Image (tube, rainbow, N blue to C red):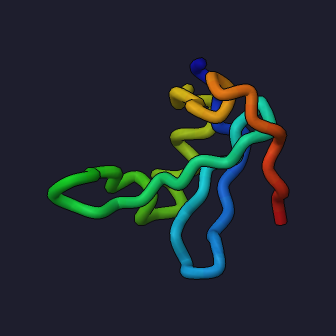
Amino acid sequence: MLQPIIGLHTDDEGHWVAQLDCGHNEHVRHDPPMIVREWVTSESGRNSMLGHQLDCKKCDERAPQDERP
């Protein structure tokens, strides 16, 4: 299910995590060549993705909302 990004934070290992409007979190790593998300490497890039929709697999599984910092 597509859900918009409403915020971002880092996890305990320093990886970026998107906070989705549905209450779930989704890691958004930049790990080339497998995952290319250069936008997470800069503040302006991260800000530009606010409102962008990601496919939330946790919604499809009807998982409970995640905790957020």
Quarter occupied by residue 32: bottom left
Q: Give the residue furthest to the bottom.
A: 13
Give 8 or 63, whichever is nearer the viewer.
Answer: 63
Please name the residue shown 82% across and 41% down the image: 65
Q: Return the x and y of residue 7 as percentages of the image width and height.
A: 71, 48
Toward the viewer: 40 or 28?
Answer: 28
Q: Which residue shows up at 67% across the image and 63% down it?
A: 9
> Residue 30 location, x and y as percent?
35, 60
Instruction: Give the residue at the far top of this rendering.
Output: 1
The residue at the point 53 percent across, 30 percent down is: 54
- Relative side of 19 to 43, left or right: right
Q: Residue furthest left?
A: 33
Residue situated in front as seen by the camera: 28 or 66: 66
In the rendered view, tell whether residue 51 sits above or below residue 15: above
Can you give x and y, in whole percent of width and height, for residue 36 in the image?
26, 51
Question: 57 above or below 32?
Answer: above
Question: Where is 37 relative to 42, above or below?
Answer: above
Q: Residue at x 27, y 52 (%)?
A: 35
